[in-house]
Image: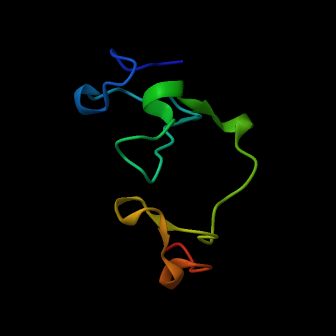
Amino acid sequence: MLKPAAPNGYNSFGPIEIPEDQYMMLGDNRDNSRDSRRIGLVSRDRITGRAHTVAFSVNYEEYYKPRADRFLRPLN
């Protein structure tokens, strides 16, 4: 697995070459996600599904107020 230089170095995560059959997973909370910048790349055989809908969404800047307009919306 490839890992970033710093454990929480999201701002310093530099370009990497992604090998065939490996995928970089990115979370939707860019500054605080446990995604490939922290856990490394994911091999194709570990991927079992595909996201197609937002189930639940909150606004972290407004005390976790639910964003009802995003509930059950399809991902494009």
- Residue in the picture at 53% in, 68% down: 57
Residue 40 visible? The answer is no
Q: Where's residue 66, x and y in %? A: 51, 73
Q: Residue 28: give x, y in percent of width and height.
A: 45, 54
* Vertical relation: 3 (above or below) 25: above
Q: Is 11 on the left or on the right of 4, as rendered? A: left
For residue 2, side relative to residue 56 (left or right):
left
Q: Is residue 30 above or below residue 24?
A: below
Of residues 53 and 70, the one nearer the viewer is 70
Q: Is residue 10 visible?
A: yes
Mark count: 0
Q: Quadrant of residue 16?
A: top left
Q: Nearer the viewer, residue 56 or 5?
A: 56
Name the quadrant of the N terminus.
top right
- Residue with the most extreme front position: 63
Q: Is residue 35 above or below residue 59?
A: above
Residue name at image x 41 percent, y 59 percent: 60
- Measuring from the top left, give residue 20's x and y in whole percent: 53, 32
* Colour scheme: rainbow
Instruction: Report the residue that reaches farthest toward the bottom.
Output: 69
Residue at (29% x, 28% y) in the render: 13
Where residue 55 appears, x then y in whole percent? Answer: 64, 70
Q: Nearer the viewer, residue 72 or 2?
A: 72
Residue 69 versus residue 37 in the image, above or below = below
